[in-house]
Image (spheres, grey):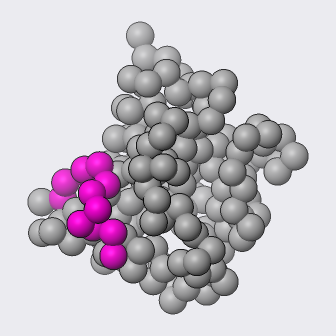
Amino acid sequence: MIEIIPFRKEYQDQLVKLILDIQQLEFNVPITAADQPDLFIIDDFYRKNGGEFWLAVSENKVVGSIALIRIGNQSGVIRKMFVAKDFRGKESGIAQRLFDHMLGYCAQNDVTTLYLGTVSQLAAALRFYERNGFVTVSKESLPADFPIMQVDNVFCKLTIEKQI
């Protein structure tokens, strides 16, 4: 049983380990915990302007994450979408559940456009975003308040369709 819950401090260490293991060990992305101070100030960085940070938890173990940063003009930025290797794929559906959970939050909180930055090494993640309606955009077309991560080299945008 996998539950999607808002971030809780008790999961801090597990969250950081999950993300760093995927970034560094799996995909050789040259990034450290020190390069990602947002992971240690979830409330101040993600929640202060109306964003949120969710975890996928299985048997008290963090197996996935997704976060939303609110920026201006009814827009948000997806950050920290990661799923542990053993929990990936359509069979488990965790990535889709995390994403859909975040979309529900966006609908309830008047977020109509989503942006994200990622790295080209994460080909499966890029395919996931494309399947969910994201289109690639240039770095120059991002909103001025988009928080760019130094390692990101691919940027995407999704216009959320209003449900009637």
Residue 12 x, y percent position in the rendering: 33, 69
Lateral position of residue 161 relative to residue 54, left or right: right
Residue 52 x, y percent position in the rendering: 41, 44
Judge whether 143 appears above or below 160 on screen.
below
Residue 142 x, y percent position in the rendering: 78, 42
What is the magenta range?
2-13
Residue 126 seen in render: yes
Question: Quadrant location of the C terminus?
Answer: top left
Quarter of the rendering containing residue 37: bottom right
Residue 140 x, y percent position in the rendering: 87, 46
Q: Residue at x 44, y 43 (%)?
A: 47
Q: Residue at x 53, y 78 (%)?
A: 33
Q: Residue at x 48, y 79 (%)?
A: 20
Question: Quadrant location of the N terminus?
Answer: bottom left
- Whether 75 is among the magenta residues is no
Which residue is more in the foreground, 124 or 8? 8
Quarter of the rendering containing residue 86: bottom left
Q: Residue at x 39, y 80 (%)?
A: 17
Residue 27 seen in render: no
